Image (cartoon, grey):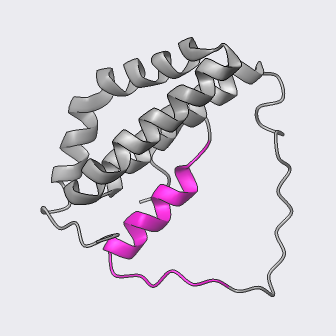
């Protein structure tokens, strides 16, 4: 089905793709012999760092909400929220994090509807 557009313009779309491929019955494999040149920042070099950080936070939360089962979410989300908040407070930029959380809250109905389309199966990361 390709990359999920909710991760656009970048960050975590490849990880989400692997989660969905695994749920569809594909085996995710690793090979140390393949070399991929990743031009990090190529897509985002014109964006300010705060935009990139905010999108990273937003898409990380989307990835977890879309792919983690309820048990893992309830264990993981509070830790991630606390760590991210402490880090952003130390940097003096908590607004970046709050904006990401707000974006995810606005998208929650769509995220939840995508979770349900998998037939309620959440075998991942138990």
Horizontal side of residue 25 vs 81, given as left or right: left
| Residue 62 rendering spot, x and y as whole percentages | 40, 41
> Residue at horizontal 41%, vertical 24%?
101
Quadrant occupied by the C terminus: bottom left
Residue nearest the observer in this picture, 94 or 125: 94
| Residue 81 rendering spot, x and y as whole percentages | 43, 34
| Residue 37 rendering spot, x and y as whole percentages | 86, 62
**Residue 100 appears in the rendering:** yes
The stretch in magenta equals 11-30
Horizontal side of residue 19 vs 47, given as left or right: left
Horizontal side of residue 68 vs 63, given as left or right: left
> Residue at horizontal 28%, vertical 39%?
111
> Residue at horizontal 77%, vertical 37%?
43
| Residue 109 rendering spot, x and y as whole percentages | 21, 31
Horizontal side of residue 50 vs 115, given as left or right: right
Position of residue 43 relative to residue 120, above or below, is above
Position of residue 69 relative to residue 24, above or below, is above
Quadrant occupied by the N terminus: bottom left
Q: Quadrant of residue 88?
A: top right
Residue nearest the observer in this picture, 20 or 76: 76
Position of residue 83 relative to residue 115, above or below, is above
> Residue at horizontal 82%, vertical 39%?
41
Position of residue 118 relative to residue 75, above or below, is below
């Amino acid at each position: 089905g390709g990359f999920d557009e909710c991760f656009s313009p970048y960050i975590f779309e490849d990880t989400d793709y692997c989660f969905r491929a695994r749920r569809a019955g594909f085996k995710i494999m690793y090979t140390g012999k393949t070399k991929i040149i990743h031009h990090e920042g190529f897509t985002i070099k014109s964006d300010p760092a705060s935009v990139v950080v905010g999108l990273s936070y937003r898409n990380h939360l989307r990835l977890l909400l879309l792919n983690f089962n309820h048990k893992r979410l309830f264990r993981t989300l509070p830790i991630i929220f606390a760590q991210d908040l402490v880090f952003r407070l130390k940097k003096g930029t908590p607004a970046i994090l709050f904006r990401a959380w707000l974006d995810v809250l606005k998208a929650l109905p769509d995220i939840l509807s995508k979770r349900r389309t998998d037939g309620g199966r959440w075998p991942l990361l138990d």
